[in-house]
Amino acid sequence: MSKKIDTSHIVKLDDTNYQRWKLQISLVLRAREVWDITNGKTTRTDPVADATGAEDWDKLDMEAQAIMVPTLSATQTIHVYGCDTAKSMWDKLADVNCDSSTLNK
């Protein structure tokens, strides 16, 4: 069983603090060794070809999601309801909150 991660020191992502949140949460994800899954560098293996690898990836992906979600405000959580991986959550939050997003123009 994984050790519980305390994310209480991380600011909750709201509509005004994306860059600060991004820095804080990415450091935690790196420290927990799930950053490569979150940013898409490590992808899920084919479960038929490598069942153990896919299962291990699923566990790490779930850990990354479990780290991120408690750090989101209620309005930000709405954006990730349809996301099924840490990478899709990360990408969606970046899309919604980065300075070049349509919502922020």
Image (tube, rainbow, N blue to C red):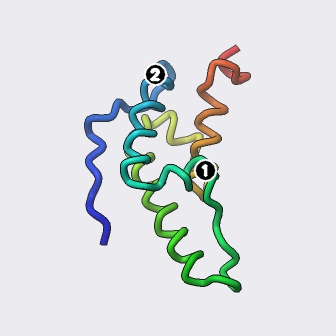
**Residue 102, above or below 4:** above
Badge 1 crowding class, 10 Å Cα cut-off, few under 14, some 14 to 19, many 20 or more, is many
At x 50%, y 33%, the residue is: 75
Secondary structure under tag 1 reads: helix
Residue 74 picture location, percent across and down: 45, 37
Mark 2 or 1: the one toward you: 1
**Residue 8, above or below 34:** above
Disc 2 marks a residue whose amino acid type is: Asn
Residue at mark 2 to residue at mark 1: CA–CA distance: 20 Å
Indicate which disc residue 87 carries. Answer: 1
If the image is split into quadrants, where does the C terminus sit? top right
At x 29%, y 52%, the residue is: 5
Q: Residue beneath label 2, please?
A: 17
Label 2 vs 1, first from the N-terminus: 2
Residue 2 picture location, percent across and down: 31, 66
Question: Is 71 placed left or right of 79 in the picture?
Answer: left
Residue 25 picture location, percent across and down: 42, 38
Which quadrant would residue 45 be assigned to in this image? bottom right
Disc 1 marks a residue whose amino acid type is: Lys
